[in-house]
Image: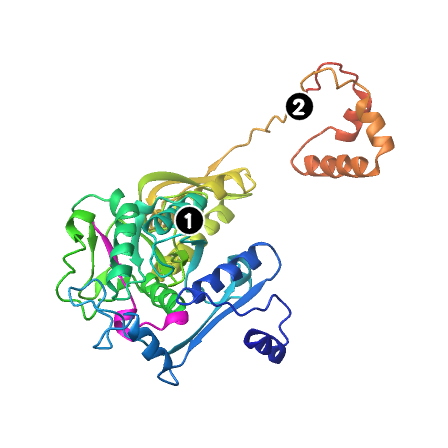
Amino acid sequence: MRANRISHFYDLRGPSMSIDTACSSGLVSLHQAVQSIRSGESDMSIVGAASSLLNPDMFISQSTIGFLGADGRCYAWDARAQGYGRGEGVAALILTSLDAAMRGNHHVYAIIREAGLNQDGKTATITSPSIEAQVQLIETCYKRAGLDMSRTGYVEAHMTGTQAGDLAEAEAIARTFGSCREAQDPVLVGSIKTNIGHTEPVSGLAAVIKTAFALEYGLIPPNINYETPNPKIPLNEWRLQVPKTLTEWPLGKLRRASINNFGYGGSNAHVILEARGESSSANEGKRNSLSVSKSRVYIFSAKDSLACKAIANKYAVYLRTLIEIDQGPCPGDLAYTLAERRSLFSWVVAVRASSLTDLADQLEQPTLKGSHTTKQPRLGFVFNGQGAQWHAMGRELIQAYPVFNSAIREADSILRVYGATWSLLGMCIMIPVQIQIYLTAK
């Protein structure tokens, strides 16, 4: 009843449950929270986990089956790996949809692009990790999200320091992330367990917190207790690299990271995180960065030249503000919205730019001028003849359906605002054309 007691105290009404899948409990809970928000069951979720080492019973039990190292440290992927060191910890995450976070003006540390779970199934022993299951889970997560894993900059691995677990996970990462890299472009792999120990059910949430800050600042912390690579893990051949010092985010890679986590009973979890400024699912690989490889045309429109110039200047100031905090919009999305989702008036400024910085520079130019057209636009509607249409169909619809009548009248008023000298309502009732109706402003 631990989760239920929290819900009772805070009067929380959404799904409330305690989940135990051993070391993967935190990320399994996070997956359930994501699903609850996606389904509309909840609009916000709290994912928490805690681990307190209050008595020696678990130390004795885990030592007898070879889980713990004699030094009490996690020598992840190191030649000294002999078992993991236990750690205490408490962690909690607040999850909500990005739209809700933006409406509430909340600070967004990272965006969850996808989360997935699976189970090892029948392995040699119940605690033996499955390479195939981990590979399948990683591939499924990326396929479901529609993402290219070769563009992921960093993998926060489980990396406990056990021989069986480290070798299995390293091979799984090599067969997924490593296999799509060149020899000179290894994937960076690390783990928070070398810093705070293995916090068991908290470990997945601790990994999320670490990775979220790494994404926000573009810096990957070093793996301590890592001196000599485990000879059973051929890093160069598998195109993997463990950072030993504070490392800047890999050049040319998206601020995207994967978190891999598994429990000793075989429950695997994988989460894909992105920095807030990265691309949306609509355009994989198109980073919301300050520069892009190709130029785009950005259109600004208004009803007079002064308003057009003012809009351009305001956009320049707005873009400068976002650029300074590295939160610029996706250039492709901005160009598309300006061209396809804004009304076009008689005055237009069209600017070609290769980056957001370039766009802001051009919008601030005193010589920037808009173009103006005095020609009345010709507006036409064509209804193809397929046998179902006939000249009087509009008459009956207008008479029989009030909602259609209302829509036609509303469209008629909008068209008049744009300069139509004829009545849409009158045309629907009056003109008898069997094959097509062609209306112009003349």
Left or right relative to 362: residue 426? right
394 in relation to 307, above or below? above
Q: Nearer the viewer, residue 288 or 186?
A: 186
What secondary structure is marked by label 2? loop
Q: Please say whether residue 297 is visible from this viewpoint.
A: yes
The residue lying toward the viewer, choosing from 240 and 247, is 240
Quarter of the image containing the N terminus?
bottom right
Where residue 287 appears, as percent x and y from the top left, is: 35, 48
Q: Is residue 402 left or right of residue 116?
A: right
Q: What residue sits 75% from the left and 29% below the top?
A: 424
Q: Residue at x 73, y 28 (%)?
A: 422
Q: Which residue is mark 1?
A: 141
Quadrant of the drawing holding the C terminus: top right
Q: Which mark is residue 440?
A: 2
Quarter of the image where one finds residue 376 = top right
Badge number at residue 24? none
Dot 1 crowding, Cα within 10 Å, few <14, some 14–19, many 20+: many
Q: Position of residue 236 (x, y in %)?
A: 15, 50
Question: Helix, strand or loop at disc 1?
Answer: helix
Q: Earlier in the sequence, mark 1 or mark 2?
A: 1
Q: Is residue 296 above or below residue 167?
A: above
**Distance CA(mark 1)–CA(mark 2):** 52 Å
Left or right of residue 332: residue 383: right
Looking at the picture, how far across and down is residue 213, in whole percent? 34, 66
Q: Which residues are magenta?
A: 186-202
Rendered position, 251 above or below 433:
below
Please state the horizontal and vertical placement of residue 318, each as a whole percent of the image.
Answer: 43, 57
Picture quadrant where residue 147 is located: top left
